[in-house]
Image (cartoon, rainbow, N blue to C red):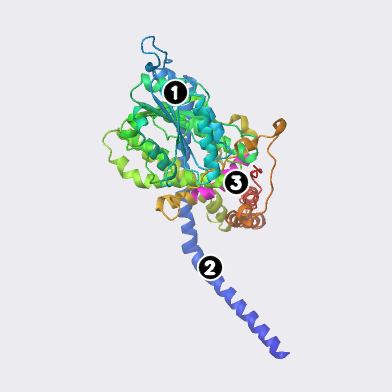
């Protein structure tokens, strides 16, 4: 018995010794090392946050000016409807190629093909090209059958396949450009498999290209058929509202440049070829093409009044993969093209500065990284170090101003702004990770996972919402990274509530809950049985 007591006492003494040793190390390194390091990181984050605020403020002033003076593209560029000629007949209309790349799109292939085939354009002046990369033979057969059905109605539709998926979407588009009939075309319109253009799309977009030879691209706005499906889709719509209403509009009006959205746009064939065509070196082949064409001096036009129906990801995994691609790709493209932009001789210094600083550095790098590192890592850590003070402008004024400017395009969803802020902070975790993967070109830099679409599965009888199929798979429902950040924020909030004086705990508890909600998979809907 005495031996057991002695052993227990020895263990307690050893544990006490280790704790005391760790405490001594902490006291010796805290003041001279950790506090100065945290101050430096905080200073850098606040500086970057201020740069983001200045960028958002500039964009807000610019869009206010555009709306106030009604600077619509129809006023800036010549636009007249195309009319048939009595002598030339339909030959007065340019030849147009419509490309629809798809991959195992069972739920939406009929919607996109049908919408493209119903475009109002002379039948002998248009080619509909379905680029099918499907690996499922059954889906492939269905798509081919749909193309034959429209061909029997007199539509000039081509069903094209290839032997591999090299280059993914960029590879499919590039391969589609090699067919002999493409050489007859002056313009190419591109629609992803879930996009449904209105019949007058070409009639409203093509005149910009016909009457203004300096224009290479006409981009339409996306409109979402499932924006009201769940809270996840509503918050996505809020983010897209700023992108289209502010970023694309200001880029078009002020710089005649913006990032091509990869779909719902029309390219001048000669500009596309002059820029080097489609490249698959990143996961944002659309932005890559746009930057190269912009560096050649071509102008772009964004037409907010032309809207194309599409679908938002309604499961968190689909949305997360999409955001990884859209965050990693631009960072990787910036790494590859920064020097090419800086040394370009065809565009002005101002446009090069806009591309490098505003378009890439602030919007594609800082916007993702500073949101997560400052508000989810550094600021919470300061509750343990009272000597590291976060200025009020960094915690209240600048974030509030950025938020107000960010929701300019989503006024009708103002009641969701708190949920949107918390969710965007959660998503900044994935965007930051993807940004660093792209910048350092690590293993997942070129990962491409096709965004899952529901299409007609969203519709049920009497217009009710799609039935939710609840499944519990640890890999799909539980996200460890979000749970770890949630625990960290919860601990920081508890410490601040118990011992601190900053009152950060209100925000920290709310943000921790948001991470837990996402971490346990309680966001988005589940794919219904097809």
Residue shown at the point (69%, 46%) measured from the top left: 469
Residue 289 visible? The answer is yes
Q: Is residue 423 magenta?
A: yes
Q: What is the CA distance from the residue labelled 3 to the residue labelled 1?
A: 34 Å
Q: Secondary structure at mark 2?
A: helix
Q: Is residue 154 magenta?
A: no
- Residue that badge 1 annotates: 205
Asked if residue 94 lies left or right of residue 241, the reply is left
**Counting residues from the N terminus, which is met first, the one under dot 2 or under dot 3?**
2
Residue shown at the point (57%, 53%) measured from the top left: 380
- Residue that badge 3 annotates: 316
Residue 2 or residue 300, whichever sits in front = 300
Q: Nearer the viewer, mark 3 or mark 1?
A: 1
Residue shown at the point (53%, 35%) measured from the top left: 145
Residue 526 or residue 43, whichever sits in front = 526
Q: Residue furthest front?
A: 152
Q: Position of residue 460 (x, y in %)?
A: 69, 35
Q: Secondary structure at mark 3?
A: helix
Residue 406 visible? The answer is no
Q: What is the CA distance from the residue labelled 1 to the residue labelled 2?
A: 65 Å
Instruction: Please give the range of residues in magenta.
Output: 418-432
Q: Nearer the viewer, mark 2 or mark 3?
A: 3
**Counting residues from the N terminus, which is met first, the one under dot 1 or under dot 2?**
2
Quarter of the image that includes the N terminus: bottom right
Q: Position of residue 425 (x, y in %)?
A: 56, 46
Q: Position of residue 209 (x, y in %)?
A: 38, 23
Q: Which mark is residue 26?
A: 2
Q: Nearer the viewer, mark 1 or mark 2?
A: 1
């Amino acid at each position: 018995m005495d031996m057991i007591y002695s052993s227990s006492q020895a263990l307690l003494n050893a544990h006490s010794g280790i704790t005391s040793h760790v405490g001594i190390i902490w006291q010796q390194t805290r003041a001279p090392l950790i506090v100065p390091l945290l101050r430096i990181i905080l200073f850098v984050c606040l500086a970057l946050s201020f740069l983001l605020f200045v960028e958002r403020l500039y964009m807000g002033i610019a869009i206010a000016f555009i709306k106030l003076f009604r600077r619509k593209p129809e006023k800036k560029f010549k636009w007249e409807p195309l009319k048939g000629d009595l002598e030339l007949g339909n030959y007065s209309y340019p030849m147009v190629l419509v490309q629809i790349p798809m991959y195992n799109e069972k739920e939406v292939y009929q919607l996109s093909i049908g919408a493209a085939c119903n475009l109002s354009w002379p039948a002998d002046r248009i080619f509909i090209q379905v680029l099918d990369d499907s690996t499922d033979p059954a889906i492939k057969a269905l798509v081919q059958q749909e193309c034959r059905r429209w061909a029997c109605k007199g539509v000039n539709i081509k069903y094209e396949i290839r032997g591999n998926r090299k280059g993914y979407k960029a590879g499919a588009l590039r391969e589609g450009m090699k067919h002999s009939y493409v050489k007859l075309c002056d313009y190419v319109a591109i629609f992803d498999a879930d996009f449904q253009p209105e019949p007058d799309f070409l009639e409203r977009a093509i005149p910009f290209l016909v009457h203004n030879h300096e224009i290479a691209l006409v981009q339409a706005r996306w409109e979402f058929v499932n924006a009201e499906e769940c809270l996840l889709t509503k918050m996505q719509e809020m983010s897209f509202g700023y992108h289209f209403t502010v970023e694309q509009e200001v880029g078009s009006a002020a710089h005649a440049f913006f990032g091509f959205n990869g779909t719902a746009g029309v390219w001048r064939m000669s500009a596309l070829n002059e820029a080097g065509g489609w490249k698959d070196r990143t996961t944002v082949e659309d932005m890559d093409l746009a930057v190269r064409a912009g560096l050649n001096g071509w102008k772009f036009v964004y037409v907010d009044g032309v809207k194309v129906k599409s679908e938002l990801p309604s499961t968190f995994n689909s949305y997360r993969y999409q955001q990884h691609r859209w965050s990693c790709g631009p960072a990787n493209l910036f790494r590859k093209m920064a020097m090419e932009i800086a040394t370009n001789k065809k565009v002005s210094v101002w446009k090069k500065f806009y591309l490098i600083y505003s378009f890439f550095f602030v919007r594609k790098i800082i916007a993702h990284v500073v949101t997560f590192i400052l508000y989810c890592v550094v600021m919470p850590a300061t509750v343990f170090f009272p000597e590291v003070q976060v200025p009020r402008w960094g915690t209240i004024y600048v974030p509030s101003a950025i938020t107000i400017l960010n929701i300019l395009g989503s006024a009708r969803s103002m009641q969701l702004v708190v949920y949107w802020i918390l969710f965007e902070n959660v998503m900044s975790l994935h965007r930051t990770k993807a940004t660093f993967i792209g910048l350092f070109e690590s293993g997942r830099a070129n990962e491409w996972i096709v965004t899952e679409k529901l299409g007609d599965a969203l519709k049920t009888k009497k217009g009710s919402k799609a039935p939710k199929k609840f499944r519990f798979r640890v890999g799909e429902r539980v996200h460890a990274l979000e749970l770890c950040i949630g625990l960290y924020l919860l601990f920081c909030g508890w410490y601040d509530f118990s011992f601190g004086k900053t009152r950060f705990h209100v925000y920290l508890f709310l943000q921790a809950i948001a991470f837990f909600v996402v971490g346990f998979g309680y966001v988005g809907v589940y794919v219904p049985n097809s």
